């Protein structure tokens, strides 16, 4: 359940938390684009490291470390797949050499950069502010509501899954027993109650919403309104510049790989 | 026998739910664990079948440390019925639901059939044998959950909030059932807020507050103790409150049983009439 911990929002205030979600999201998208642009190890390593000060500035290092730990399994999988597939299935099989390891590592790091930037975004943006940002970006309120509700219920569902697991373990269910197929089947007693209760809960939520006159007026007003501040403009400008710079580098400057650098020295 | 020795438990998120709890539950005991929300009741009983393992200290079930054995082998001895039956029901029929635990513990087909029939009968569910558990009412689902645990005949039965959402009649049935189980030699542990229910059952009460056991004794002693009930923020049973209100007439204040109360009142009125 540790992966879901990243979704649980804690009310903390920091300069990063105070940023406008829209600008922050733009920044995340810029990181995303840059991570996709570059396939080499060095720029990806740079992208990974450059975000770490942000994590500390926001004071979310513990939760962030937990999400990263949750991503480790997938990261290992990505590394192995890249390694194995470029080794066995490309036209000119590359031997397990420095460059191959570097390439596989770069692909893994690309994934980690994406996880890192998105987890920073979600760890420092409360679901409420996120919904507000969506609303003010003229996304129909139905979608905003569906989105914030979904985010809001992830930790609830995770907790419920834990209770169900406990209840079934108390009836002698051993999740780790048997071969792969058996292990997957072991999860049926967890999934069915979880899905049933999720459906039941959504129906109850719908009724509760109806009884509070959901959708009674076309135009909703908000108590809080997002407004761009100076820090937001700074971040927006920095993001745009970073993007322009990245595209320039991508077009005109050849990026050395780590292995050629090492060999050169 | 369950021995809890100076147990501390901290959840992964840093909340310390148990801080130095020691408790011995002998075979054949009937114990009610009471206390306000967040006092650590459920955390404590989850130690009994190994769902949670102590951060410090140890829990022994029949002399075996819970930290050194599997939940499954503990669950065979210590049956745990969760508060919400919807957290465990998943089969297509009630029969299958009850057989689930038996299959997990490796009983053979014949025994499973026999035990399922026995458990269905025990909780008056025989007519629902082929019904989907999702079609049943809340009370019936609760009974199916109970039957699915009792089916493998554990030595100890833990019931987490068994009375929630049950009407008076169901509660009374449940009470008789629990008393009967206990009379047959089963150790019964009930986690509950329901003071009236405890007063009627009159078990040993373990009172918790903020991760500690603040009192351990008979229901009569604890539920009528003014300071303790205030500390653990529980309301004494209605009968007790009446007798506390009548204390100036010289009536006893440690009454929790309705029949005893009636006898005392009749004696008192009889004496007055004379």
Image (cartoon, coloured by chain):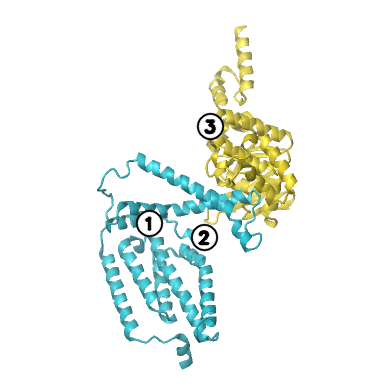
Q: Which chain is yellow?
A: B
- Classify residue A226 by image quadrant: bottom left
Along the line of sight, the residue nearer the viewer: B130 or A178: B130
Read off the residue under disc 1: A126
Instruction: Say whether disc 2 or disc 1 marks the residue closer to the N-terminus.
Output: 2
| Residues at marks 1 and 3 touching, judged by CB atoms closer than 8 Å | no
In the figure, B75 relative to B236: above or below?
Answer: below
Asked whether residue A146 appears in the rendered view, the answer is yes
Q: Are marks 1 and 3 on the same chain?
A: no
Tag nearer the camera, 3 or 2: 2
In the rendered image, the residue lying farthest to the top is: B274
Query: Mark 3 sits on what residue?
Result: B235
Circle 1 chain: A
Could you say whether the residue bearing mark 1 is in a helix, strand or loop?
loop
Residue topped by disc 2:
A2
Calculate the distance from the C-alpha at mark 2 to the C-alpha at mark 1.
19 Å
Query: Residue A59 at x, y = what percent?
Result: 42, 63
Q: Position of residue B138 (x, y in %)?
A: 54, 37
Q: Quadrant of residue A26?
A: bottom left
Q: Which colour represents chain A?
A: cyan
- With respect to residue B19, does A87 lie above or below? below
What's the residue at 39%, 68% (across, down)? A54
Give the structural element (helix, strand or loop) at label 3: loop
Q: How many marks?
A: 3
Mark-to-mark CA distance, 1 and 3 = 39 Å
Residue A135 percent coordinates (x, y): 29, 55
């Amino acid at each position: 359940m540790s992966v879901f911990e990243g979704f649980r929002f804690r009310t903390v205030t920091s300069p990063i938390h105070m940023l406008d979600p829209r600008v922050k999201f733009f920044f995340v998208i810029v990181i995303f684009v840059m991570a996709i642009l570059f396939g080499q190890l060095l720029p990806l390593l740079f992208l990974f490291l450059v975000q770490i000060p942000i994590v500390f500035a926001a004071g979310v290092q513990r939760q962030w470390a937990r999400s990263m730990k949750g991503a480790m399994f997938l990261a290992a999988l990505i590394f192995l797949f890249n390694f194995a597939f470029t080794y066995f299935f490309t036209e000119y099989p590359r031997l397990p050499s420095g460059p191959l390891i570097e390439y596989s590592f770069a692909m893994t790091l690309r994934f980690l950069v994406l996880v890192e930037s998105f987890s920073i975004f979600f760890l420092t943006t409360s679901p409420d502010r996120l919904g507000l940002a969506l609303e003010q970006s003229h996304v129909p309120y139905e979608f905003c509501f569906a989105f914030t509700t979904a985010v809001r219920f992830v930790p609830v569902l995770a907790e419920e899954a834990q209770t169900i697991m406990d209840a079934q373990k108390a009836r002698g269910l051993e999740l780790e027993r048997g071969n792969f197929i058996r292990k997957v089947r072991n999860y049926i007693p967890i999934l069915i109650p979880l899905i049933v209760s999720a459906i039941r809960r959504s129906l109850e939520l719908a009724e509760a919403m109806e009884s509070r006159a959901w959708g009674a007026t076309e135009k909703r007003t908000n108590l809080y309104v997002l407004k761009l501040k100076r820090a937001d403009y700074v971040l927006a400008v920095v993001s745009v510049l970073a993007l322009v710079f990245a595209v320039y580098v991508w077009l005109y400057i050849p990026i050395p790989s780590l292995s050629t650098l090492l060999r050169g020295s | 026998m369950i021995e809890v020795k100076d147990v501390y438990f901290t959840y992964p998120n840093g909340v310390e739910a148990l801080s130095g709890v020691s408790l011995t539950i002998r075979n054949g005991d009937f114990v009610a664990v009471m206390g306000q929300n967040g006092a650590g009741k459920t955390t404590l009983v989850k130690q009994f079948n190994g769902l949670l393992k102590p951060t410090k200290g140890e829990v022994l079930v029949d002399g075996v440390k819970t930290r050194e054995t599997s939940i499954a082998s503990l669950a065979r001895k210590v049956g745990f019925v969760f508060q919400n039956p919807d957290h465990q029901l998943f089969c297509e029929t009630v029969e299958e639901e009850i057989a689930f635990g038996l299959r997990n513990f490796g009983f053979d087909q014949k025994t499973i059939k026999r035990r399922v029939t026995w458990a269905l009968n025990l909780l008056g569910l025989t007519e629902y044998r082929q019904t989907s558990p999702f079609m049943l009412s809340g009370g019936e689902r609760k009974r199916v959950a109970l039957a699915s645990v009792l089916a493998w005949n554990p030595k100890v039965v833990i019931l987490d909030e068994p009375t929630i959402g049950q009407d008076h009649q169901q509660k009374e049935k449940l009470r008789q059932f629990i008393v009967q189980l206990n009379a047959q030699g089963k150790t019964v542990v009930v986690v509950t807020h329901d003071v009236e229910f405890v007063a009627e059952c009159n078990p040993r009460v373990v009172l918790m507050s903020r991760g500690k056991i603040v009192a351990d004794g008979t229901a009569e002693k604890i539920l009528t103790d003014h300071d303790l009930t205030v500390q653990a923020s529980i309301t004494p049973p209605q009968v007790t409150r009446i007798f506390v209100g009548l204390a100036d007439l010289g009536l006893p204040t440690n009454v929790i049983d309705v029949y005893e109360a009636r006898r005392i009142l009749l004696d008192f009125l009889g004496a007055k009439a004379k």
